[in-house]
């Protein structure tokens, strides 16, 4: 989930091709792929560069890997799986007769889980990531989570779960990977400028004290208290590819080095119950295995000695945990362990007995690493300069804009730009019709120099058709009426993103100017009214609020387990209206509930209700009907788009009025995960949905009766039912696209009068 596995396997294929075909083949591949007009012909490019396709190379690497695997080999003696099928499984910790760990199964958001010795698995809390969860002596669970401290910053802090609620201990402290000893004292990794240190934190989070010095060439990770609380084992990463397992006293003084290697990685130290042995993982053999070593103490501080491998991995092992006492110098003879095992269906937590192997030196240097030395540190002595974004804002690209407006062909170009920190950004476009010399364009600019709110400025000019002039006496068309709309606006946008919810608001003010042209030109002066000869200026103000707390697990087919809502209001002052203007308000509320039914993802029940009100004279203020989704920009024109009052199976604009309501219900279920690609499309997941829509519109007393198809009072709603096949695609294996292929059947009293010409449709994005 998320695509990481695809990139990892892809990098392995390229590494194998470079090794077997020569490094120059990679350069040839880049040259060939740059030359082809159709960049998605990957196998053709590979054959020209490497002499075989990517598909063939993948089969060869896969077959070679499978031949080297002994399916009957167990990582530990008496191996038994306790919990499996996790996309991520981190930091198992003892809690009574069970084990607590952080996990992510893709089907639900990350969480803390507990499994007992019989394999009974229970989710005990929601988390933002699959991280460390440490059982405390008082029954709480200590964890670290990421949270936004502003729209531009995210920080890791410590939390304690008591019951089902999380209580925050620190604010913006940048603490991660915590561990707690029996009295509640905490040790954690703290991010500081350019590096990390180990820090001790009081049980209430009020006191934070670094116990190691900050150094640009050293990083710290995964600290663990010894059972007696007098020592700390941790990972120390040193510039130059050096990885160590070290033991410190409680004040941060180094007592000894357990493992010291270059070119491979030591990780995840864990203490035996008697505090005499340290377990850890290392991939020095080519696979991540579990090793055991004697733990140095204050009375016998010493350099790295010998270690012993105690596992036999097929793929990779991680995060060992001692489940019983360990005996034997430098190794374990009857030590029972729990460890994370990478399997075909994800990570599994299992237990077994250590299998001590021959002792080997704790210091190691991977084969081939002797020639690979640390790169020299770059020093820049040039003077610091003020930040100048102008050069970054110059246009770097343009895209053509081509579309048809009735009988007119419109040509143009569009571009955009932003500086590297996102303080300034803009979008610009210009276009011209091939007939009548009509010119349009738009420019919008956003400034984030205040942090919050964002400042938006925009100007635009556009032409559209305003009807055809008719000779009253003969009924013959005399010419076309064209309307030019020029708009200038300024606004503020405020947002409050959080990991579990988001809030946003905006306020915009501006003026819209409309004037008219006729073709032929003399036609405008022929009207007795001066309406077409005047410029109509209409000031406006609008504002909106939006909130959401929905969840979206990695393999979800829909947002779930939350609500989202928005409300917007607009006031337009128009001297041509009797009332001097009108007000418009729209709001919607949607709720989503996951259902724990079989499938690769949760089934979801989704409900939505929307309403709109306006005192406008225009009977077409709100329209009901059509299919809602996401707009796709093609040639400067948006195909499709969202609608406040959709109803599938009916034409767009089936009903119109100054009042409207709509409701939808959907049942969404996972189908299969093909995970296959062809040309530029990659099909990741698929799902189906069953839906029912209902909507109606009517007019208030101010509205002009002509054109008010919904009547003066609420009538029978339009109703439809149907189903959709939903394909979750990736375009060029990168840009996500949700495609819906649906069929709708209008039902009810009005089903025949306003039904769409076709019951089958294709749309992008979710309906809501």
Image (cartoon, rainbow, N blue to C red):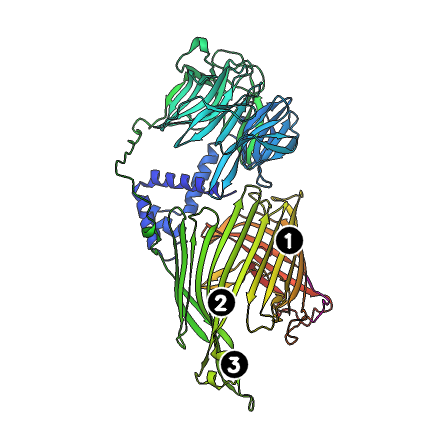
Q: Residue furthest left?
A: 382
At x 30%, y 32%, the residue is 375
* Mark 2, secondary structure of its residue: strand
Q: Up-down: is 368 above or below 747?
A: above
Tell me if label 1 and label 2 are in contact, CB under 8 Å. no
Circle 1 or circle 2, nearest the eye: 2
Q: Is residue 73 left or right of residue 215?
A: right
Q: Which residues are magenta?
A: 711-720
User: Disc 1 and disc 2: Cα gap in Å?
Assistant: 30 Å
Please identify the quarter of the rendering in which residue 613 is found. bottom right
Q: Residue furthest bottom?
A: 473
User: Disc 1 and disc 3: Cα gap in Å?
Assistant: 40 Å
The one of 200 and 453 positioned closer to us in this rendering: 453
Specify the quadrant that holds the C terminus.
bottom right
The one of 307 and 402 positioned closer to us in this rendering: 402
In magenta segment, residue 374: no
Q: Which residue is mark 3?
A: 468
Q: Which residue is mark 1?
A: 589
Q: Which residue is mark 2?
A: 512
- First in sequence: mark 3 or mark 2? 3
Chief secondary structure of the magenta span?
loop
- First in sequence: mark 1 or mark 3? 3
* Mark 1, secondary structure of its residue: strand
């Amino acid at each position: 989930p998320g695509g990481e596995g695809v990139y990892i396997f892809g990098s392995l294929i390229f590494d194998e091709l470079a090794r077997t075909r020569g490094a120059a083949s990679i350069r040839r591949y880049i040259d060939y792929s740059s030359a082809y007009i159709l960049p998605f012909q990957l196998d053709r490019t590979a054959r020209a560069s490497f002499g075989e396709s990517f598909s063939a190379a993948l089969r060869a690497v896969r077959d070679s890997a499978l031949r080297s695997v002994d399916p009957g080999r167990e990582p530990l003696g008496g191996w038994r799986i306790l919990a499996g099928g996790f996309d991520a499984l981190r930091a198992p910790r003892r809690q009574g007769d069970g084990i607590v760990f952080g996990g992510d199964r893709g089907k639900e958001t990350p969480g803390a889980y507990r499994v007992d010795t019989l394999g009974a698995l229970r989710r005990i809390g929601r988390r933002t990531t699959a991280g460390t969860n440490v059982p405390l002596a008082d029954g709480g669970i200590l964890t670290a989570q990421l949270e936004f401290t502003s729209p531009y910053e995210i920080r890791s802090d410590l939390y304690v779960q008591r019951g089902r609620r999380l209580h925050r201990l620190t604010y913006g402290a940048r603490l991660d990977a915590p561990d707690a000893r029996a009295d509640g004292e905490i040790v954690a990794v703290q991010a500081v400028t350019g590096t990390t240190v180990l820090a001790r934190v009081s049980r209430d989070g009020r006191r934070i004290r670094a116990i190691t010095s900050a150094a640009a060439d050293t990083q710290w990770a995964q600290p663990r208290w010894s059972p007696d609380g007098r020592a700390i084992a941790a990972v120390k990463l040193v510039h130059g590819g050096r990885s160590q397992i070290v033991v410190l006293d409680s004040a941060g003084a180094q007592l000894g080095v357990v493992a010291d290697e270059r070119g491979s990685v030591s990780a995840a130290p864990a203490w035996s119950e008697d505090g005499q042995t340290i377990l850890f993982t290392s991939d020095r053999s080519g696979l991540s295995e579990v090793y055991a070593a004697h733990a140095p103490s204050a009375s016998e501080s010493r350099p790295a000695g010998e270690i012993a491998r105690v596992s036999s991995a097929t793929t990779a092992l991680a995060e060992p945990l001692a489940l019983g006492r360990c005996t034997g110098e430098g190794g374990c003879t009857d030590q029972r362990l729990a460890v994370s095992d990478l399997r075909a269906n994800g990570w599994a937590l299992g237990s077994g007995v250590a299998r001590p192997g021959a002792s080997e030196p704790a210091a190691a240097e991977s084969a081939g690493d002797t020639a690979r030395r640390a790169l020299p540190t770059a020093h820049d002595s040039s003077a610091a300069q003020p930040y100048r974004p102008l050069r970054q804002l110059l246009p770097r690209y343009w895209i053509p804009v081509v579309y048809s407006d009735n009988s007119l062909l419109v040509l143009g170009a569009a571009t955009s730009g932003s500086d590297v920190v996102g303080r300034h950004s803009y979008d610009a476009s210009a276009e011209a019709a091939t007939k009548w010399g009509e010119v349009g364009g738009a420019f919008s600019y956003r400034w984030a120099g205040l942090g919050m709110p964002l400042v938006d400025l925009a100007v635009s000019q556009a032409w559209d058709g305003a009807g055809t002039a008719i000779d009253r006496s003969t009924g013959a068309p005399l010419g076309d009426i064209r309307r030019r709309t020029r708009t200038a606006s300024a606004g503020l946008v405020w947002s409050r993103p959080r990991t579990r919810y988001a809030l946003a608001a905006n306020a915009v003010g501006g003026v819209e100017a409309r004037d008219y042209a006729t073709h032929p030109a003399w036609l405008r002066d022929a009207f007795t009214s001066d309406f077409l000869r005047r410029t109509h200026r209409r000031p406006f103000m609008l504002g909106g609020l939006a909130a959401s707390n929905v969840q979206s697990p990695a393999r979800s087919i829909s947002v779930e387990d939350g609500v989202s809502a928005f409300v917007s209001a607009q006031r337009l002052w128009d001297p041509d209206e009797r009332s001097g203007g009108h007000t418009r308000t729209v709001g919607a509320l949607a709720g989503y509930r996951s259902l724990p039914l079989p499938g690769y993802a949760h089934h979801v029940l989704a409900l939505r209700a929307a309403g709109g009100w306006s005192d406008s004279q225009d009977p077409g203020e709100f329209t009901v009907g059509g299919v809602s989704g996401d707009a796709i920009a093609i040639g400067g024109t948006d195909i499709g788009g969202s609608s406040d009052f959709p109803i599938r199976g009916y034409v767009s604009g089936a009903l119109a009025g100054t009042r409207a309501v709509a409701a939808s219900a959907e049942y969404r279920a996972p189908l299969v995960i093909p995970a296959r690609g062809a040309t530029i499309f990659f099909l990741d997941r698929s799902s189906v949905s069953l839906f029912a829509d209902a909507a109606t519109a009517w007019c208030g007393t101010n509205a002009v009766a002509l054109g008010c198809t919904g009547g003066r009072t609420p009538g029978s709603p339009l109703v439809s039912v149907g189903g959709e096949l939903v394909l979750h695609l990736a375009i060029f294996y990168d840009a996500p696209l949700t495609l819906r292929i649906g069929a709708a059947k209008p039902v009810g009293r009005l089903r025949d009068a306003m039904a769409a010409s076709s019951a089958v449709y294709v749309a992008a994005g979710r309906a809501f």
